[in-house]
Image (cartoon, rainbow, N blue to C red):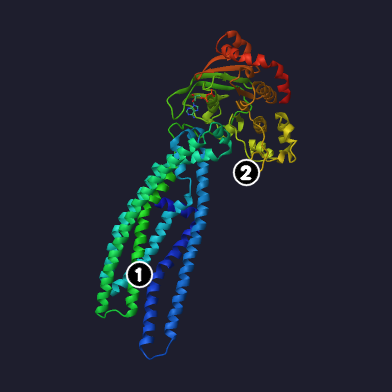
Amino acid sequence: MVYALKALKITWQHEKNWLLLSVLNSLALGLIPIATVWVLQKVINSVMLLIQTTTNNYVIPLTWLIIQFFLTIIHSALQEFQIYLDRKTEERLEITLQQKVLNKVVSVSAFYFDIPDFYNRLERISGNVGGRFLNPVRGMITILKEVVTVTTIFSYLFSIHWSLSALSILAAIPILIIQRRVGLKQYLHVFYNTSLSREVQYIQFMLRDRSTSKEIRLFRLGDYFISKWKHKSKDLLDQSLKLLRKGQIFTILGEGISAFFYLLAALIIIFLIKNHSLTVGEFVAVGHAVQNTQTSINNIAKRFGAFKEETLYIRDYFDFMNYKHENDNNLPGNEKFPNPLQLGITFKDVSFTYVNSDVKILKDISLHINPGEKIAIVGENGSGKTTFVKCLSGLYPLTKGQIFFDNIEIRSIKESELFKNITVVFQDFIKYPYSVKENIEIGDVYHTGNIDNIIEDVSVKSGVHDFISKFPKGYETKLGRILGDGEDISGGQWQKIALARSLFKDGEIFILDEPTASLDPLAELAIFEKFDLLTKNKTTFFISHRMASAKIADRILVFKDGEIVETGNHEELMNLNGEYFTLFKIQAKWYEDNTLNQSDTLKSI
Ligand code: ADP
């Protein structure tokens, strides 16, 4: 009930007019049944009078018939008005609440996306939040309407015979109990199956999506995934059908009980007619009234029963909105980012463990980086390079230790300030299915003033301009085919777009986390060299698992098992004859074999 009241509060905050109008409308609707019963009795009695006597006065029965006609129209109009109000409010509330959910999703730290519990909660509240919020509120309004109906009709029945109203109350009890049980079960089904239905959806997505289509075919995974999808879907279906069957048995049982009580009521009516204590009008009207009470009490019971289920969904919403993981030690920092950096970046005993694991991925890293320094990070796959970047960029909160920009600790810096000044291009950067221009300006959507010149400038520098100018629509050329007919460009060209985007952002610190991994090593080296020139005074990090790219750096950090095992420039590290030397030698052969092509490759970048 607490959550139903919370829903009511939120609805009141956002849709006050709807709430007031709905209450008024429902009160009017609640009075319709007694009015209908009463008018029906009048119609029949006046018609009977006309038939049974010699009078030819048609005015009275006609008047009652006209009243009955208008009552039907009013009833229908009020109902339709309520449907319209509900629909409008539901959609509006959906936008308001989904916006709150999306705000929460984008505000949480990136590591939340590693937590299945977070995903599952998000999944449970992803569809139709507006409707679910409105349901218990609608329930309360319906109960109010039915209470008006029941009390007025009760008084009417009571005036005929007390036992008729008593019977109606008795009929309500079993229905109430059944509705509560069925409602809770339905929710529990959704609750326990969220990860299963997520898997089903994910498999479907993989089979349909363009980005996965090549691999699915090449590995001949079609049948494998379809059969997996079929099994899981069948499991889901079996469970929900089982639940449906149970619910239906309960419903039949409930309706049987109602019918039994209705039968008793009919016996009482027959008894009363036999004793001549009812007119024909009253006889028909009482039958109608008993049915009406049954329907109303059924509705009240259903709405009460459904409260449990409906409010459990609302609890999910509030649980999600208040969800905070224990590792979330981010402070609401409000310091500015020290731009330009004067002292540099300092790592102090930095350790990091992912939420869903016990393995320390970064182990007590201590390090100082000078402002403007060009750092290369190398190391085998899985040695912790990307994790280092995730921590450095503030995407993941540290498990232990501190990172300082000048002498301001990362957590004291306002998040928007931090992200404004740190630019990271990841290997899996986003390929927006928009125009070239938009793909670049997305680098800094807060940029004001004329940006066309800047876009062209960064495009020339990153090599985008060369291939874009060949398209008839130039910078307005749409890319990709997700949102319709766009140009398909190569992986290398997308990478240049990503670099142009990062240059447009113009941060204080640039990090390239293998965005060039799909290029050949020499092409990658050429991009790194170019990028190095373009980001002259900025502090820059290049990550690559290719040693040759590291040569251009002021300093190289060699990662191994979450530790920095060597640091120095290329010559120093080669002289050390250690990890770097070994990795370099393993790859050196490739470069020797390809030196002939090197100048050609560099030209093509
Ligand atoms: P690198 O960039 O050097 O290839 P990463 O930093 O990506 O290495 O990964 C280091 C280790 O952390 C790997 O063993 C990887 O399996 C693990 N790891 C990476 N991301 C996650 C994650 N989101 N959750 C759990 N473990 C992760």
Quadrant hosting residue 38: bottom left
Quadrant hosting residue 596: top right
Examine the rendering and report whether any part of residue 414 can be seen: no
Q: How many labels does the image show?
A: 2
Q: Identify the residue position indicated by label 1 in the image.
A: 152
In the foreground, 207 or 330: 207
Looking at the picture, which amino acid does disc 2 mark? Answer: Leu
Q: Which residue is drawn at 40% across and 57% down?
A: 139
In the foreground, 559 or 203: 203
Q: What element carries label 2?
A: loop
Quadrant hosting residue 533: top right
In the foreground, 90 or 183: 183
Q: Which residue is drawn at 48% across and 62% down?
A: 82
> With respect to residue 265, does 544 lie above or below?
above
Q: Residue at x 66, y 39 (%)?
A: 479
Disc number for residue 8: none
Q: Identify the residue position indicated by label 2 in the image.
A: 483
Q: What element carries label 1?
A: helix
Residues under labels 2 and 1: Cα distance?
Answer: 58 Å
Q: In the image, is 271 to the left or to the right of 246?
A: left
Residue 327, position in %: x, y?
44, 31
Q: In the image, is 568 to the left or to the right of 133?
A: right
